[in-house]
Every structure is written in structure tokens, then in C-alpha cells.
Image (tube, rainbow, N blue to C red):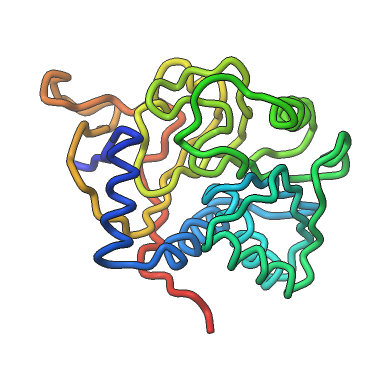
């Protein structure tokens, strides 16, 4: 039977750590994450990539590199100067490629046809503070197509709870489905959810998501798929960094 793994944020963090330690570099995983997002979307027009300071922001810088190399008009809107080692690598590469980069200010997304949300990752809890709150509100009030990367910024990855979160047309979650993404509350924030398989080795199996019409009892640890979840992942698990 076709199924998708559904895991906790902590399990995702441990799986990511273990994979980097034993199998694949974090830099390659970041590139694969960006490639998964790239393949999930019909890109067009002016593309604004909103980035934060962690690895979620790094996915955005890597995506900007891929878009620029494929001749799309994209620019980076940053809300933080902090960079991890891997995100710093892609931020520098994006600059070398000539991707415009600007600090967030009111009106930053006004002319965008597509906005990519790479602001906050699955570890976020609590409520949004400024300038993050204003940026999320501005994204939600725009007429652009909105793409969430890994999780909609402002949402709790384990519960799906959010006081304010990005509302997306498509969310591309990286590696595995996190519990919060299929919670009843999450349906308020996303129209479509797809998984990018980037080759992360699962540290521990938890629950399984099965097709909604599957004849499987819930006490077997199986969860019926919500109607917005695509059961076929985007497989980028063999992608390697270009020379």
C-alpha cells in the first residue's frame, strides 16, 4: 500500500542530523530541498523569495540560485542577517549570480507574481514578532501565488497551531510530513501540500499516512490523508550540486 511517513519535529531534526553525519552533506541536502521546490511550481513573472536566518532561509537562497540559472526573474527579501554555514554558501552564490537582495521593508512584495516563504522553519513556536508579523501579513494580503517551503511560517510543526501564519497555494515540505501539517488547523493555511524526498534517512518510524479511501484501521497507526496532501512525493534524492 502506498503511504507517507508522518513524524514529529524532533524526529525530523534527528533524522536530518544523522543523515548529514553519516551519508550526505548538509549543503547537498539544502540544494536538493531547493530543487524539490523548483520542480513543484509553475514559475512565472516576478518572484520574491522571503528568507529568514536559518536553514529555511538557506533553502531560499539555494532556490534563488536554481531560478537564476534557469533564467527566471527572482529577488531575495531578507528579514535576518544571520546565516548558517550552508545558507551562507548559497547566499554568496546567489550574489555571484547577480540575484538582487534587499532588506525587508513595507511594500517589498507589491510587484511579485510569486512569493516564496522561507522565513521560519519547523522549530518555530509561539507568536510572530516584528518584522516577521508584518511580512507575513503583507504576504497574506498580496495577490501573488504563495509557495511555502517546509512549513508555513508562523505554524507549529507538531500541532499545526498558529495565531498568524502564511497562507500558501502550495507548501513543499522537506523530507517527511510533519504532524502539524496534517492537523485540522493546518487546512486553513494551505491549499496543496507535497513532499520533496531529498534522501534523508528516517531515524525512527512513527505514524503512516494512507490514502483517504484505504481500508486500514486507525489503531494501526495509520492516518487518512487530508484532501490537500499529494501522496506522490517529488523525488530529488539523487540530485548533486552542480560543478
Residue lying at 28% horizontally and 32% vertically, measured from the top left = 211
Counting from the top left corner in percent of width and height, residue 191 is at 55, 30
69 lies above or below 45:
below
As drawn, 96 above or below 54: below
* Quarter occupied by residue 75: bottom right
Q: Is residue 198 left or right of residue 161?
A: left
What residue lies at 22% left-to-right and 34% top-to-bottom?
A: 208
Query: Where is residue 119 shown, x and y percent of the image?
Result: 62, 40
Q: Quadrant of the N terminus?
A: top left
- In this rendering, is residue 234 above or below 145? below
For this orientation, the residue located farthest to the bottom is: 243
For the residue pair 112 and 213, the one nearer the viewer reads as 112
Image spot of residue 70 (x, y percent): 68, 70
Is 91 placed left or right of 182 in the picture? right
- Vertical arrangement, residue 19 with respect to residue 51, above or below: below
Q: Nearer the viewer, residue 228 or 214?
A: 228
Instruction: Examine the image and state in which quarter residue 43 appears.
Output: bottom right
128 or 219, which is in the foreground? 128
Q: Position of residue 77 (x, y in %)?
A: 76, 48
Query: Where, by quadrant of the figure, is residue 177 drawn?
Result: top left
- Total numbered circles: 0
Residue at figure coordinates x 57%, y 59% from the top left: 87
Residue displayed at 67% across by 73% down: 69
Amino acid at each position: 500500500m502506498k503511504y507517507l511517513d508522518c513524524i514529529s519535529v524532533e524526529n525530523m531534526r534527528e533524522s536530518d542530523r544523522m543523515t548529514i553525519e553519516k551519508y550526505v552533506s548538509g549543503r547537498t541536502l539544502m540544494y536538493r530541498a531547493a530543487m524539490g521546490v523548483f520542480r513543484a511550481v509553475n514559475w512565472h513573472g516576478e518572484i520574491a523569495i522571503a528568507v529568514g536566518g536559518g536553514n529555511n532561509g538557506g533553502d531560499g537562497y539555494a532556490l534563488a540560485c536554481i531560478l537564476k540559472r534557469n533564467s527566471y526573474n527572482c529577488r531575495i527579501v531578507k528579514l535576518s542577517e544571520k546565516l548558517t554555514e550552508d545558507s551562507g554558501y548559497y547566499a554568496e552564490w546567489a550574489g555571484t549570480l547577480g540575484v538582487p537582495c534587499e532588506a525587508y521593508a513595507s511594500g517589498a512584495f507589491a510587484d511579485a507574481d510569486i512569493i516564496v516563504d522561507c522565513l521560519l522553519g519547523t522549530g518555530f513556536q509561539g507568536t510572530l514578532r516584528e518584522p516577521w508579523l508584518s511580512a507575513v501579513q503583507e504576504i497574506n494580503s498580496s495577490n501573488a501565488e504563495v509557495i511555502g517551503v517546509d512549513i508555513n511560517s508562523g505554524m507549529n510543526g507538531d500541532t499545526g497551531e498558529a495565531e498568524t501564519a502564511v497562507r500558501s497555494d502550495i507548501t513543499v515540505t522537506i523530507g517527511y510530513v510533519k504532524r502539524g501539517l496534517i492537523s485540522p488547523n493546518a487546512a486553513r493555511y494551505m491549499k496543496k501540500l507535497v513532499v520533496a524526498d531529498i534522501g534523508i534517512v528516517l531515524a525512527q518510524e512513527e505514524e503512516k499516512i494512507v490514502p483517504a479511501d484505504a481500508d486500514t484501521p486507525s489503531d494501526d497507526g495509520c492516518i487518512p490523508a487530508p484532501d490537500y496532501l499529494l501522496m506522490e512525493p517529488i523525488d530529488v534524492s539523487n540530485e548533486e550540486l552542480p560543478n
